[in-house]
Each structure stands twice: as C-alpha cells, then as structure tokens.
Image: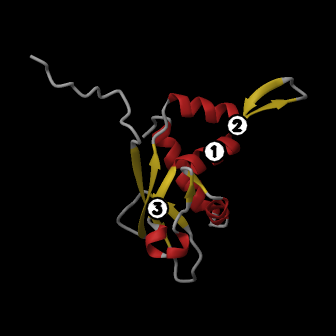
Amino acid sequence: MDQPKAEIRWLLKKDETFRIRFAVLEPEEGRVRAVTDEVREGVQHWAEFLMWDYVKMTEMRKKATKYHLDSRSFYVDQDALNELKFKNLMKSWSFGEVDPQMKLQHFNGVLTDESWKMVQGMYPCLVQALIERMNAVLEGWA
C-alpha cells in the first residue's frame, strides 16, 4: 500500500514567496520620515518576494562579483547584488494598490526598466528598508 508522500519541510515549494510588512511614517508636510516595523503607527504596507533557491543565489552572487585591480582579488558588490535580488525576486507591493501608477511591471519574471526606475526614484529610506527586510528573510536572519 502506497503511503502519501510526506512534505519535507526543508525543501522550497515551487515559486515559494514571502511577504514583509512594514509601516511608513508620513508627516503632514509630506516628506517620508521613517520606516518602522511598528505596525501600530504609520501607514501599513507590504511587499512580496519570490524566495530564492541555491541555484538562483549563486547565479546572482556570481553576476555581482567584481575584480579589484589594485588588490588583485574578487569581491561581491553588495549594491549590485541587492539590485539583482530586488529586480529578480520582487513580485508585488501595496504601493500599487494605493496608487495604480506604482503597480510593478515584469517581463519574463524580472522587473521592467520602468519599474526599476520608479523604485530608484522613491525615498531612499523606503528602498533601503525594503532591501534590509528582504535580505533578512533571504539570508535567514528573520
């Protein structure tokens, strides 16, 4: 008699995603002041990312690896790696629900250049907070 296959909890599911939640403080003068994990204050938002597997992780790290001529050594450019992660793993976010102009567009599963330019035009504290929270999950810190 065949036993049903048990789910192995250490294996990723196909197209597994994760969602981060955060609050954005928006003072009356219109400038974003901070991003916080405190969900009791600020405007509530979320972002959803695709979870990477070992193959995607190593491919992105290789693409972000640079050669430093003076020291004759290789290093991972963390800014380039974060950009690759964001472009390849970002699925959706609540900003697109609030403002249809901020809906993320993808081509072959990767953020379009237009969507990436929009992300680059946001307040740096927002983008940095998204990257930090994304990395916390991808790297197993959260």
Residue at 63 percent across and 36 percent down: it is 60
* Quadrant assignment for the C terminus: top left
Q: Tell me the distance, in whole angstroms, between the alpha carbons under discs 2 and 3.
A: 25 Å
Q: Secondary structure at mark 2?
A: loop
Q: Farthest residue to the front: give it.
A: 1
Can you say whether 98 is above or below 116 in the image? below
Choose the circle earlier in sequence order: 1 or 2. 2
Q: Secondary structure at mark 3?
A: strand
Position of residue 127 measured from the top left corner of the image (x, y, whole percent): 59, 58
Q: Which residue in the structure is indicated by mark 2?
A: 64
Q: Mark 2 belongs to which amino acid?
A: Ala
Q: Is residue 25 left or right of residue 78?
A: left
The foreground one among 40 and 100 is: 100
Choose the circle earlier in sequence order: 2 or 3. 2
Q: Tell me the distance, in whole angstroms, between the alpha carbons under discs 1 and 2.
A: 8 Å
Can you say whether 8 is above or below 51 in the image? above
Q: Farthest residue to the right: give it.
A: 70
Q: Mark 3 belongs to which amino acid?
A: Trp
Q: Which residue in the structure is indicated by mark 1?
A: 84
Position of residue 98 measured from the top left corner of the image (x, y, whole percent): 45, 75
Q: Is residue 101 left or right of residue 22?
A: right
Position of residue 65 measured from the top left corner of the image (x, y, whole percent): 73, 32
Query: Looking at the image, do the residues carrying marks 1 and 2 touch, with CB atoms under 8 Å apart?
Result: yes
Q: Check disc 3: other Cα within 10 Å, few if <14, some if 14-19, many if 20+.
A: some
Q: Which residue in the structure is indicated by mark 3?
A: 93
